Image (spheres, grey):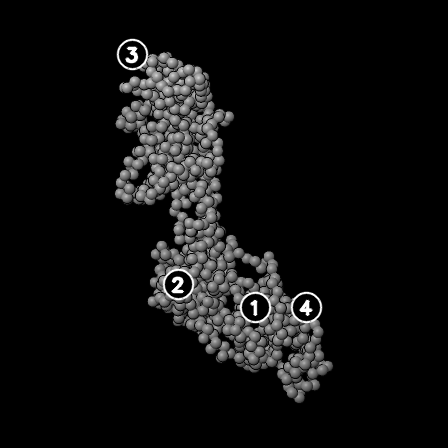
Amino acid sequence: MASQMPRLTAPVRPSQPRSDRDAYPTPDGQGPLTATTMAMPSGTMGAVPTATTTTMPMGPATATMPMGTAATAMPMGTTTTAMPRGTTTTMATGTSMAMTQPASLTAPIGPLPPRGTQVGMFLTSDDQVLTRRVEETHVPDGSRQIDVRPLFQIVEDVLNRATQTIAQGTLMGTQMATETMEGKASSTLLVSTPDLPIIIDRVSCEILCKCWAGGDAHEATLSVLRLLAHFPWEAKVVLTLAAFGMTYGEFWLLAQIYPTNPLAKSMALLKQLPIIVEQSGSYKFQFEAINKLIKAILNVTRCIIDFKELPALYLTEEEPQLRAARSYFPVAVYWTIRSTVGAAAHITTITSRGFEHLPASNITWELSNWEFKLNSIYEHLMGTMKILLDLIEKRREESDFEMLRKFIYEMIHVDNMPVLKRLIGGKDDPQPLFDCANKRRVHFEVLRRKSVILLISDMTISQNELSMLVQIYNATKIHQYEIVWMPIIDRSITWTDTLQTQFERLQSPMQWYSVYRPTQIDSAVTRFTREIWNFSGRPILVVLDPQGRVLSPNAAHMVWIWGSAAFPFTSLQEEALWKLETWKLELLVDSIDQTITDWIRDGKYIFVFGGDDIDWLRNFIRQARSVADSAGIDLKMLYVGKSHAKRDAVSKVTAALMADDKCHCWPEPTTVWFFWQRIESMLLSKMQLEQADNHADIITQEIKKLLSYDRGPGGWALLSKGSTVLLLGHGSTVYEALRQHETIWRKEVPLVGFDNAFRTHLVTFDIPSAPSSRFDFPLATGRIPPGMLCPRCHFPMENTSLTSAAMRKPYLRPP
């Protein structure tokens, strides 16, 4: 019997398809296939077991082989047809074989089934099963390496420019600022990978063929993965995305330019784009869903590339978080490629058959389902990425910090340029410095082979400190050094216009150089200043010689005590200056006030006293004046306020005493601040030279007493004759000794003199109310001694940490 093979026919599409799969078109564009028969020669025999009935419920119908059936034997020259899963076949002895084409082969690659639809076992299994299946397709051999970053940038640019929104029933380009690709992607991309276009074309053909030939998205995804088996994970997703970008970009390019370009118009007609444009308004939500899916695909792809580019210098292959992320790559790559293939299927369906062939009732949910899956993967990977980036940043900071320490203290430099550039920053700025005196920007060259003092502070440096530094700097006619202000800021705070205004206001009175932008100082330098140079908020002065060597990590105390006379601000110079000093009044008041200098020159009796209790101060002044009148001496009195007291409180006390006109006061708070700053600097200097507990050092012991009295309650008083200091005591002790002048030691004055009588009585005089010694070292000083001996009893003092909200201050705060 002659064989007959009827042509496959496609009846009219039903108005309500049985399923979404039935709604997809066939490759010839005639609509979904129905069961047709294919007659085959009778009498052909095959070896099929008898008494067997097989039912295959995987397709829209079942295939039954009745008992006693034999499979037909195909004669030579007969073409056989493979019957994949889901084929309905009826076989009977000596009769024809009926075959139904499966929907999974005739439908283009579509989205995930709607909710409630039965899917294959693989897609509902956990990620471990999926990982094993995907890893079976992954056999990288190291020979297919692609610089994926520039390729991804090109694809991203294509997709960003092609992304559209639907507005008023027409296709409108998204109004977004997309940077030009000029200089973005390397021009050597094609040179380094000459077969890149061929690879992308092969992937594109693989996707399009699957879209046309039929098959589910899972098998199509695995097919792409097998095609790219020898490429690394990041290359797989980028190449697939590039293939999709070719199709997607071409679609939107024609849609945008065909009204004005004749060639594009002809091509658009072939693709029926004018019809698609007319109908696009009704499918706004579908296009928005595709755009969101593309954004999710780009995010995951970018994240995978970022993992590839993590610096190996700070991470090892055995890093737990890195291994965990890489073990998740098969799942991430699979769903990224599957979503890309699915998006390509939707675009292909639109361009080939139009919107009416899309399952409009489910497409938005299906695309959103993929988007949700990718967003979950992205969040998972980014969580791991954040942990790794924090770890890298921590290790990078440690490495930079150690390199900076060696660079500053161990390397030998010809001049100070390398050190200054590393500390001050702004290497990409030709003029990183600002000349505050002349209000202009300058280069590092102005500091070459000069001694440089780095003024390191935060943005809350006080006007007192600035004004006194300006006076000291201007007092030297020939400057042997240059000063550069380096404000240390909290880099977690955004630099605002308000902070810039504050920065410029602090620059205004300066007569030296400053960094042009505080943000140019590297974070490693910030840490270096705190941990190596003990910067904690209070300004420090770091001295560098012309070769960039550190002469002093903090010469601030030397500058406050001796000014420019302490140059070159080395420890040797500091020791030499102390050897020239003695315990005298000039050491305390220096040349702060010319009136005091005149008193010292004239050999006057001078009472220097302090405190903030106005009642005690007035009683003390009255009692001292009374004793001076009785003893017949010319007594001068100087009130110096109280350190660390609130500025307003001291100002009120000063104003009250000036109104009484019984003593000399400093009306300017800056002068009071400078007096106490010098006293504290003296103790810090002795501590730095490790002489704070030297009992033979009278200067150290008396300074400790003075500061201890000032920190405690009540007041204190120091009496000198000219420059010679006669006595120093707590306010309660000195005041009580003055009260006993008439009754106890007045008669001794004619015999031994006022100086000896008063001093002898005070030495043997003591009262239980005298407070214990106390020292306060703010954390901002950066140098807290582990212990100290009491200046009165010479026993070890107890350390106590005090925390107060008022004592805390940030490294950077708005004005």
Q: Earlier in the sequence, mark 2 or mark 1?
A: 2
Estimate the x, y position of residue 60 in percent, counting from the top left: 44, 19
Q: Are marks 2 and 4 in contact (CB under 8 Å)?
A: no
Q: Earlier in the sequence, mark 1 or mark 4?
A: 4
The nearer-to-camera label among 2 and 4 is 2
Q: Is residue 682 left or right of residue 108?
A: right
Q: Amino acid at mark 1?
A: Pro
Residue 786: mark in rendering? 1
Q: Is residue 229 left or right of residue 646?
A: left
Kind of element beneath mark 4 = helix
Give the answer, above or below, for where 132 lies relative to 681: above
Residue 407: mark in rendering? 2
Q: Are marks 1 and 4 in contact (CB under 8 Å)?
A: no
Q: Earlier in the sequence, mark 1 or mark 3?
A: 3
Kind of element beneath mark 3 = loop
Residue 2: mark in rendering? 3
Estimate the x, y position of residue 698 in percent, counting from the top left: 56, 79
The nearer-to-camera label among 2 and 3 is 3
Distance from the alpha carbon under mark 1 to that under mark 4: 37 Å
Estimate the x, y position of residue 101 in percent, counting from the top left: 38, 20
Kind of element beneath mark 2 = helix
Q: Residues within 10 Å of mark 2 (few under 14, many from 20)?
A: some
The nearer-to-camera label among 1 and 3 is 3
Q: Which residue appears farthest toward the top when viewing the image? A: 1
Q: Amino acid at mark 2?
A: Phe
Residue 615: mark in rendering? 4
Residue in the picture at 48% in, 71% down: 558
Q: Residues within 10 Å of mark 3 (few under 14, many from 20)?
A: few
